[in-house]
Image (cartoon, rainbow, N blue to C red):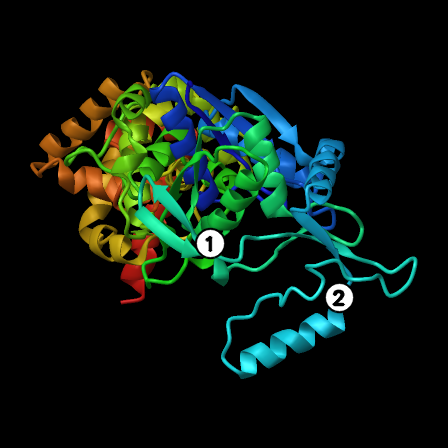
């Protein structure tokens, strides 16, 4: 049988880092083995599931390039099928109606907790309880085996054994008739011929319950691989404060999808010391059996570093519209400035994200408010006054505002004053940019443009004079 994997998110929120990694591992396993990858939307929680969350999941997967072969299949469109299987279990005596009230179950749980007994249903209705009234509400419970054990040969964790006497008769249909998670998963995985279930290890305790339902239906369960959780740097489960935001937030923040995918595949899996992988290499090399058993730690600095590597290697033509989006978020119209491709070419080795690239490129489009204090103290001193005046005069007379000509002007001023080029270029850079770091001075002047450069040099000259007068 060919490999069939699935990603089955609940649309009660966005696609986060943990879910995206699970989807990636499932996608890679299917692609490596020439199988199929199925997207299933587990939306039976009608109160919490929203169309917006479904769309956020679809958009996140599209951005990451995790294409699916079948789906999205919505569980809410399969209620008739679930009812059919529930009736089959009832008819075969493998499920039963339970009329126990919420009050009774709460009291039972409290008593078990007090006695330090593992809370579980005591099976009062297991052998055919009479309904307290004709219209009494009830749930339907699965009749779990009372003895024996369930063995899970997990592809990551190895053999895990569960005793059936530790498992209670779980509810498979609520009082309103809606099916529950552990039941629908079994029906879906069977109907969709899923061969391998790759999911977070928070689902491991559900696995024996699901396997027992499979066997009650005369079905063979799929092979399981439970992926360890992702932790923050503090060793606690990943949350928003660690960076566990929507994957689409990373798009908003200027990350490239291939960088995030590369980072996710390395969270718990490795191939020697290799850090960067093409998608083709991931498909060729990834095997879920090589995933570490230990939890992985999410490192935002490592992700940012990896993103920078991808930005540096990316085609500047591709990055240009992405930088334009980031500039627009900062209230800048990139069309009112130099060719955006030239801006990317000048800055793409200087930023970890496209948002950072937009931030360090603001000076190209508008005057800055204040000088960097340290840069001004070091470079905008009285000794810089003459070089700035001379270079301002030469720039004002320049017809050809191209990098080569601009470089020549700075060099000629330095030679005329018999000083090193840096003694002209650095005060000039701080005057034009507001800080001591920017692309080469010739490229910087070219991108900012004649009018803005001359205006800012005048401002710097006034700044130096005023500070000199203040002592």
Q: Position of residue 405 (x, y in %)?
A: 24, 19
Q: CA distance from mark 1 to mark 2?
A: 24 Å
Q: In the rendered image, which residue does mark 2 sit on?
A: 100
Q: At 41% across and 22% down in the image, what residue appears?
A: 3
- Residue nearer the viewer, 207 or 58: 207
Question: Please, is residue 174 above or below residue 77 in the view?
Answer: below
Which residue, as the protein is rendered here, is positioned at the far right?
Answer: 134
**Is 209 situated left or right of 142 in this image?**
left
- Earlier-in-chain disc, 1 versus 2: 2
Hey, which quadrant is residue 109 in on the image? bottom right
Q: At 38% across and 45% down in the image, what residue appears?
A: 152
- Disc 1 element: helix
- Residue nearer the viewer, 69 or 368: 69
Hey, which quadrant is residue 124 in on the image? bottom right
Question: Please, is residue 131 above or below residue 116 in the view?
Answer: above
Q: Residues within 10 Å of mark 2 (few under 14, many from 20)?
A: some
Q: Position of residue 49 (x, y in %)?
A: 69, 45
**Is 392 situated left or right of 326 in this image?**
left
Residue 341 appears in the figure: no
Q: Quadrant of the N terminus?
A: top left
Residue 205: mark: 1
Question: Please, is residue 104 above or below residue 174 in the view?
Answer: below
**Is 398 situated left or right of 44 in this image?**
left
Hey, which quadrant is residue 316 in on the image? top left
Residue 309 appears in the figure: yes
- Disc 2 element: loop
Residue 188: mark: none
Q: Position of residue 453 (x, y in %)?
A: 37, 34
Closer to the camera: disc 1 or disc 2? 2
């Amino acid at each position: 049988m060919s490999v069939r994997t699935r990603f089955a998110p609940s649309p009660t929120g966005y696609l986060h880092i943990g879910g995206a990694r699970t989807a990636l591992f499932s996608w890679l396993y299917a692609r490596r083995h020439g199988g199929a990858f199925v997207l299933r939307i587990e939306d039976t929680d009608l109160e919490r599931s929203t169309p917006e969350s479904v769309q956020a999941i679809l958009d996140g997967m599209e951005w990451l390039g995790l294409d699916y072969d079948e789906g999205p299949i919505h569980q809410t469109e399969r209620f008739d099928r679930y009812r059919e299987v529930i009736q089959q279990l009832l008819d075969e005596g493998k499920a039963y109606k339970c009329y126990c009230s919420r009050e009774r179950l709460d009291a039972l749980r409290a008593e078990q907790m007090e006695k330090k007994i593992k809370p579980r249903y005591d099976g009062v209705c297991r052998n055919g309880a009479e309904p307290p009234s004709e219209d009494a509400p009830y749930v339907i419970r699965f009749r779990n085996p009372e003895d024996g054990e369930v063995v899970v040969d997990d592809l990551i964790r190895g053999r895990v054994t569960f005793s059936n006497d530790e498992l209670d008769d779980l509810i498979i249909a609520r009082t309103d008739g809606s099916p529950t998670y552990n039941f629908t998963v079994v029906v879906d995985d069977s109907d969709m011929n899923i061969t391998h279930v790759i999911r977070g290890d928070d689902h491991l305790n559900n696995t024996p319950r699901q396997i027992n339902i499979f066997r009650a239906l005369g079905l063979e369960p799929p092979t399981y691989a439970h992926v360890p959780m992702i932790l923050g740097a503090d060793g606690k489960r990943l949350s928003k404060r660690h960076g566990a935001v929507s994957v689409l937030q990373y798009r908003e923040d200027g990350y490239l999808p291939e960088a995030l995918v590369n980072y996710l595949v390395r969270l718990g899996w490795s191939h020697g010391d290799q850090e960067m992988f093409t998608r083709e290499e991931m498909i060729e090399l990834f095997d879920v059996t090589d995933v570490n058993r230990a939890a992985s730690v999410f490192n935002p600095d490592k992700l940012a570093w990896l993103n920078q590597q991808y930005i540096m290697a990316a085609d500047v033509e591709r990055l240009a519209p992405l930088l334009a989006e980031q500039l627009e978020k900062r209230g800048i119209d990139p069309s009112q400035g130099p060719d955006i491709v030239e801006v990317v070419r000048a800055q793409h080795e200087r930023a970890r994200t496209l948002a950072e690239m937009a931030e360090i490129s603001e000076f190209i489009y508008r005057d800055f408010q204040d000088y960097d204090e340290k840069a001004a103290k070091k470079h905008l001193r009285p000794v810089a006054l003459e070089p700035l005046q001379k270079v301002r005069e030469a720039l004002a007379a320049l017809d050809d505002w191209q990098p080569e000509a601009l470089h020549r002007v700075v060099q000629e001023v330095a030679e005329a004053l018999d000083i090193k080029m840096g003694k002209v270029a650095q005060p000039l850079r701080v005057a034009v940019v507001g800080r001591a770091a920017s692309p080469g001075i010739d490229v910087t002047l070219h991108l900012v443009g004649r009018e803005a450069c001359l205006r800012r040099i005048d401002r710097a000259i006034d700044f130096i004079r005023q500070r000199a007068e203040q002592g």
